[in-house]
Image (cartoon, rainbow, N blue to C red):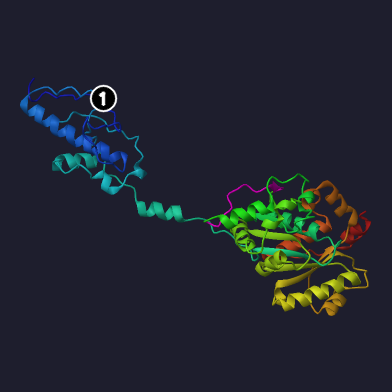
Amino acid sequence: MSNDQRMKPPPLKLGDFKPPEGLVAPPRPSFYSEESTMITSLSDLEKGRIAQGTDLPKAPPNLPSISPPLSSSNGPPIDGLPNAEFEQNIDLPSMEVEDAFEGTAQLSPEELKALEEGGLFDVPNTDQADLSARTTQPTIKPMTDMVVVFNTRGGVGATTLAVNLAGSVQAFGQHVAIIDLDLQLGTVSSMLEGKPLERSLAEFVIEASESSTGQIKSAIDERNGIHIIAQEGRISEIGMVTPDRLPKFFDAIKSQHGMVIIDGVRSFSDQAVTALDRADVILLVITQDIPALRSARQVLSLFKRLGYDRGKVKIVINRYLPKNPLTISEIEDRLDHEVYESLDNHFPFVSSLIEQGRLARDVNLKHPVTQGFDRLACKLLGIEVKAKKRGLFSFLSKRRRP
């Protein structure tokens, strides 16, 4: 065979290189390092055989078949190498700069130039890629992380408020969890579809306290897009919900949710005080009657003794009636505390929600009760809501509403 005759090496499938038996190839960080090393060795072998005028030996049985080596697609062929198109189906972003130059020390300047023209050393701009990957939309952090709904006495509708507040906060784009701290007679889960929960509050408390990362990885029951954690009367586990374990549990839940709402707090037990201490806001729920005001006055006195700031405690009047003799100003005078929000009274509508286990937003978005929950949620989230002006027609329509 003449020296000027082109020799075609056996085909090589790129990326499938294996070292001969008895040799251990060094680890390669990317696909390109294997390819460049193989190109170098084949080029030297081929040039030596061509100089001697002999045929190339067959590939060893433990080596895979190889495809033609590279040549420049934009210029004359490399001396000693046949013309071949460079395969372009390689993931360039995964290539490192040092990988592209590995194993090319034995190539001649002409070969390096040809490989460069063929695109082998084209490396993406990693700085620009990293910058675009790090550019993300900022997330809106709510003003309040943890809210405790405090029940001055039974029957004021604190649980209904807590559950529907969670629904409104969730509707405004926050991931919400509601925790029922009434370990024996909690009713939060019955307010949302009424299905039993898979796991209890005690199980999550134990998991958070024993976690090395401070995270809860177990699935939390979800109803209407809201995560629910409750004990549901599993009395045998109540002893595990200890005050020393609750802080780590609260931190874990807060880190995984935009807002945490705690219901079932109606006393000053160790568990309740632990939740009150870590809360950003305490919603003190009252109604327009003297017994509720008396209880609220005692609770406010205890809050003061516990060192809670006045701004942390916010009074919410539930089932508000404008014609009640105990007006908002009268309540503020008696309690020496500002009223934060008042929620309209509509017993038939709220009773139907409780019976069906549904949220007010899922039944009627325009109902005054629903709008009251939304107003309260907006205040806690720091969302400004402009009051709509009422005309004569809207006022008459409201009075006709059953």
From the viewer's perspective, is residue 82 above or below residue 342?
above
Question: Is residue 183 or residue 139 the one in the foreground?
Answer: 183
Question: Is residue 235 or residue 275 the one in the foreground?
Answer: 235
What are the residue bounds of the magenta stretch? 213-224
The mark tally for this picture is 1
Tell whether 207 sits left or right of 344.
left
Secondary structure of residue under mark 1:
loop
Question: Is residue 225 or residue 20 the one in the foreground?
Answer: 20
Tell whether 397 sits left or right of 116.
right
Q: Residue at x 68, y 65 (%)?
A: 275
Q: Residue at x 82, y 67 (%)?
A: 152
Disc 1 designates what residue? 65
Question: Is residue 285 or residue 124 the one in the foreground?
Answer: 285
From the viewer's perspective, is residue 194 above or below residue 146?
above
Q: Quadrant of residue 25?
A: top left
> Looking at the rendering, in which quadrant would you find the N terminus?
top left
Q: Is residue 215 highlighted in magenta?
A: yes
- Residue 38 x/y as whole percent: 22, 35
Residue type pointed to by label 1: Ser
Check the image and name the residue furthest to the top.
1
- Residue 347 x/y as whole percent: 89, 56
Specify whether residue 370 is in view.
yes
- Residue 361 x/y as whole percent: 77, 52
Q: Quadrant of residue 198?
A: top right
Specify whether residue 78 is in view.
no
- Residue 255 x/y as whole percent: 58, 59
Q: Residue at x 89, y 69 (%)?
A: 288
Q: Is residue 84 highlighted in magenta?
A: no
Tell whether 122 sits left or right of 285.
left
Q: Residues within 10 Å of mark 1 (few under 14, many from 20)?
A: some
Check the image and name the residue furthest to the left.
52
